[in-house]
Image (cartoon, grey):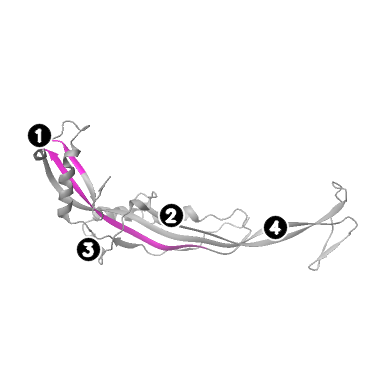
Amino acid sequence: MAKITPTPEKVPRRKTVVYKTLVDPAAIKIAGEKMKARLFTKLWVCKPKPEEIQNVSVKKHYKSYFLVEGDYTIDYYRKRYYTLNIDEKVQEVVILEKTLKPDLPKKITKTPYKTVTLDGEERLLHKNRACLILDKAGHEVDPKRVPSAPSEEHPEKALANLKENMEKLKAAPNKDVDVLRSKIVKRPPDVKRVVQELFNVSERSVIYTPFYKLTFKNARTGKVKTVKIDGVTGIAIS
């Protein structure tokens, strides 16, 4: 077994991507008006009157995702033993100027034979690659859950009021890289010596997708409900 040493890494700085909001705020309000009654309806009974449901607020937020892609490559040698069957009368075998003494004759077949064993090494190239989308907790997310949209030219301006989100990302600055590393950096168990090894992160971004949070209040009961609507697709999300 080769001596265990840290795997060389190439990790770029994370890029910030902010998706543009494609749904007009007026359309968001209209969508909220259409669904507000359902928020306070149980089993389609006791449906409140539309005028009883008040739109308290409509606020824009961003949800963050990590995109990380990379590959792991190891060029290495492994130990190998090659056994050759030879005639039982052979006393010596010379291979590559090395003299080998055969083992005792084997008589497990009708024709007895001897064997010689060669010590050798085999060179192999092992590759592993992955592209992951993670939530801010580092859990994998189905790519279908992340909408596609054009990006803001000046993402810093769009994130000017998102101090809370930025602080959470700073608390775990390399979470995305750690998850990718755990997925693909796996040295083969038969490594004897390493020629070259590299964990390379080729793409690393944090993507902010816009959504609106609408808050409604039932004026008669005082109950408050919220709904989230995707700022790219205009579809209600959980």
In the foreground, 169 or 186: 186
What secondary structure characterizes most of the magenta part? strand
Residue under the point 15% across and 42% down: 216
- The secondary structure type at the circle numbered 4 is strand
Q: Earlier in the sequence, mark 2 or mark 4?
A: 4
Q: Is residue 128 left or right of residue 134?
A: right
Q: Is residue 129 left or right of residue 111?
A: left
> Which quadrant of the figure contains the C terminus?
top left
Q: Nearer the viewer, mark 3 or mark 2?
A: 3
Give the amino acid at mark 1. Arg
In the foreground, 99 or 151: 151
Q: Nearer the viewer, mark 1 or mark 3?
A: 1
Percent of width and height locating residue 142: 38, 50
Give the alpha-carbon distance from disc 3 to disc 2, as whole Å: 29 Å
Q: Residues within 10 Å of mark 3 (few under 14, many from 20)?
A: few
Give the alpha-carbon distance from disc 4 to disc 3, as whole Å: 60 Å
Q: Is residue 128 left or right of residue 31?
A: right
Per the image, the residue denoted by label 2 is 178
Per the image, the residue denoted by label 1 is 220
Q: Inspect this view and state whether residue 94 appears.
A: yes
Give the alpha-carbon distance from disc 1 to disc 2, as whole Å: 51 Å
Residue under the point 37% across and 57% down: 67
Q: Nearer the viewer, mark 2 or mark 4?
A: 4
Give the alpha-carbon distance from disc 1 to disc 4, as whole Å: 81 Å
Give the amino acid at mark 4. Arg
